[in-house]
Image (cartoon, helix red, strand yellow):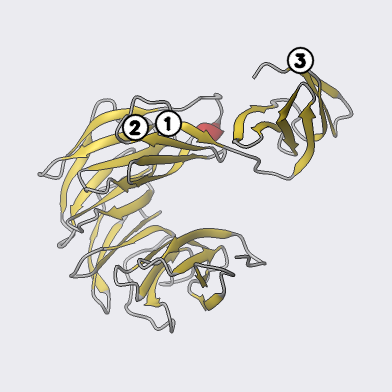
Amino acid sequence: MVSTGYQATVARYSPNGEWIASADVSGTVRIWGAYNDHVLKKEFKVLTGRIDDLQWSPDGLRIVASGDGKGKSLVRAFMWDSGTNVGEFDGHSRRVLSCAFKPTRPFRIVTCGEDFLVNFYEGPPFKFKSSHRDHSNFVNCIRFSPDGSKFISVSSDKKGILFDGKTGEKIGELSSEDGHKGSIYAVSWSPDGKQVLTVSADKSAKVWEICDDGSGKLTKTLTSSDSGGVDDMLVSCLWQNDHLVTVSLGGTISIFSASDLDKSALQISGHMKNVTSLSVLKNVPKTILSSSYDGLIVKWIQGIGYSSKLQRKENSQIKCLAAAEEEIITSGFDNKLWRVSFSW
């Protein structure tokens, strides 16, 4: 499934698993077959700027997309097979970072963005119902609970706010002295709708219990290995069955167990830039080292995959790499050799 020309920003499966909707920085949505050759089924120019988020309706007939654009073209909902509009989305003045479809009837759509607003729309056809300005900074993500009874918004103001899923009225907040100390970038509900997972620029993930009154109580803080840099900031998350998945700015995926939150996370990582060199350790033939232009060296174990990584802090572009039993030697575009002990 390859589309050339523009950077993809988001992709989601349809409820029946038959289709994949993807979007890119040009404002285009493409519908692909989920199996075999991933045939391109439909293509629609949805927004005039980049698309940041999209969601299928629970019946799989409609798609809502949000992002950047001109005038009122910041959110659009349409029939996936024809592209026909199914509503008007007034109320936002700046880039709309996230959108969500209520998973049960009556259908609702909620949106949030850089204007600090959370907007609520009824339909179809969808039209503006109400707006909330309870956040004091960018609202980065918004998601309905699995039963549609609630939805939650998270923001760069470090707050998570809960709303009634049918009326759109505010009902509570995530509250704890040990809450996030940085921007909250994403949120995901547990399958039973009783908990949420949040991730933040403070490099932590947090699990919250959602009470019947709409308040949220912190139950666990999750952390992974910390290199000390901005690459460890967590920017996305997903609660899938027993798996709590987080993604860092540097591209590391950490997978925690919901049934054993004290268990160390499984981490998956790789290169973000072009791979420039490979080396196999002669004394450990199943160990492979790879390097890339961004100064990253990754250790792979044959038959397993990713094992660990080392980030070169100095002039970072690596052109060539060689490895012996106890050290690695790299050369870069600074015409220097860099030697490091192989102990990681």
User: Which element carries disc 1, helix, strand or loop?
Assistant: loop
Q: Nearer the viewer, residue 288 or 68?
A: 288
Rendering coords of residue 15 (x, y %): 35, 66
Q: Amino acid at mark 1?
A: Asp
- Residue 52 shows in this picture: no
Query: In the picture, residue 212 is in which quadrant?
Result: top left
User: Which element carries disc 2, helix, strand or loop?
Assistant: loop
Rendering coords of residue 251 (x, y %): 56, 41
Rendering coords of residue 176 (x, y %): 23, 29
The answer to whether residue 71 is above or below residue 267 is: below
Answer few, some or many: residues within 10 Å of disc 2's Cα (few below 14, many 20 plus, some between 14 and 19).
many
- Residue 44 shows in this picture: yes
Numbered label attached to residue 41: none
Left/right of residue 137 with respect to residue 126 in the rendered view: right
Q: CA distance from mark 2 to mark 1?
A: 7 Å
Q: Are marks 2 and 1 in contact (CB under 8 Å)?
A: yes
Residue position marked by numbered label 2 in the rendering:
180
Q: CA distance from mark 1 to mark 3?
A: 35 Å
Which residue is found at the position 40% from the left and 84% from the top?
84
Residue position marked by numbered label 3 in the rendering:
326
Which residue is found at the position 23% from the left and 70% from the top?
107
Which image quarter is the C terminus in?
A: top right
Q: Considering only order in the chain, which callout, 2 or 3, is on the residue closer to the N terminus?
A: 2
**Count of marks placed on residues:** 3
Q: Amino acid at mark 2?
A: His
Query: In the picture, residue 149 is in which quadrant?
Result: bottom left
Answer few, some or many: residues within 10 Å of disc 3's Cα (few below 14, many 20 plus, some between 14 and 19).
few
Q: Nearer the viewer, residue 310 or 129?
A: 310
Which residue is found at the position 56% from the left and 34% from the top?
231
Q: Nearer the viewer, residue 169 or 80?
A: 80
Residue position marked by numbered label 1 in the rendering:
202
The answer to whether residue 178 is above or below residue 126 is: above
